[in-house]
Image (cartoon, rainbow, N blue to C red):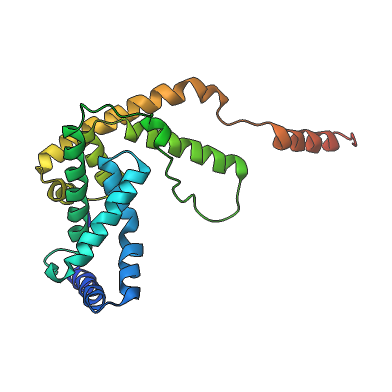
């Protein structure tokens, strides 16, 4: 992993501290900037503990309230992203422990029915409806496979693969050893790959379709070159 130049680190830290100072002065724009800057990262981390959109969103919301109430304790020893991430993890793990203690209480409803699919950005440029639909279907398969991971593996997988944290950052965030991160990530990738193989395998024969308008356009072009019209 490439090293970040020292000047860049200082610039990031200065930006964090500036945002913190402005937020402490009740600058509403600073609060919004912090949330817009870190929402996706914190949401994905929460989602790594709770594979449920509404639960993860609520965790992030509560973590922000707690973080902003204690913003004066942020001194810049770590990045603001890391500081916020730890608060999210603590909030998520606290809720997880409560749910585990209440596990003997029957819960009505189907968790799978509650969950929604996260729609990741699909990029800009010209929109190809077929390609867009295919991308969404692939993302849904990946998200489903990730949600089905055991809790220990899912948290590491979300932090390392989805959010792109380093091994050391993930270890620090989850309070585990770097070697444990590597072991769990290896297992998580194997489980995700196995589930994707099981889901994608049966439909591979339908890959790279050449039908509909594309098929008709090619046929028409060839017919014209052969001297046929219409």
- Quadrant, the C terminus: top right
Quadrant of the rendered structure where residue 158 is?
top left
Front residue of this view, candidates 181 and 74:
74
Residue 196: image location, x then y, percent? 39, 28
Check the image and report above or below for 196 versus 181.
above
Q: Is residue 66 left or right of residue 211?
A: left
Q: Is residue 156 left or right of residue 138?
A: left
Residue 187: image location, x then y, percent? 22, 30
Check the image and report above or below for 37 versus 25.
above
Name the residue: 19% across, 68% down.
9
Say if residue 89 shows up in the picture: yes
Check the image and report above or below for 207 versus 7.
above
Name the residue: 11% across, 39% down.
179
Q: Is residue 228 left or right of residue 198?
A: right
Quadrant of the rendered structure where residue 32 is?
bottom left
Quadrant of the rendered structure where residue 131 is?
top right
Front residue of this view, candidates 195 and 69:
69
Front residue of this view, candidates 56 and 39:
56
Residue 122: image location, x then y, percent? 49, 49
Name the residue: 44% across, 48% down.
120
Badge count: 0
Check the image and report above or below for 89 versus 80.
above
Residue 54: image location, x then y, percent? 36, 45
């Amino acid at each position: 992993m490439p090293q970040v130049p020292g000047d860049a680190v200082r610039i990031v830290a200065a930006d964090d501290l500036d945002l913190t100072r402005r937020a402490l002065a009740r600058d509403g724009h600073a609060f919004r900037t912090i949330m817009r800057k870190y929402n996706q990262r914190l949401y994905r981390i929460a989602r790594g503990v709770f594979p449920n959109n509404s639960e993860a969103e609520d965790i992030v919301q509560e973590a922000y309230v707690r973080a902003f109430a204690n913003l004066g304790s942020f001194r810049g020893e770590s990045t603001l992203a890391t500081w916020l991430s730890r608060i999210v993890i603590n909030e998520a793990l606290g809720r997880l422990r409560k749910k585990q203690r209440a596990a003997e209480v029957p819960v009505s409803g189907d968790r799978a029915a509650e969950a929604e699919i996260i729609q990741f950005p699909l990029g800009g440029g010209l929109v190809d409806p077929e390609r867009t639909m295919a991308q969404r279907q692939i993302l849904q398969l990946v998200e489903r496979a990730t949600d089905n991971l055991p809790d220990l593996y899912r948290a590491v997988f979300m932090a390392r693969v989805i959010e792109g944290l380093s091994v050391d950052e993930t270890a620090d965030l989850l309070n585990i050893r770097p070697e444990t991160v590597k072991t769990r990530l290896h297992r998580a990738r194997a489980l995700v790959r196995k589930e994707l193989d099981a889901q994608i395998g049966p439909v591979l024969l339908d890959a790279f379709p050449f039908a509909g308008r594309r098929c008709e356009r090619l046929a028409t072009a060839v017919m014209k070159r052969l001297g046929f019209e219409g």
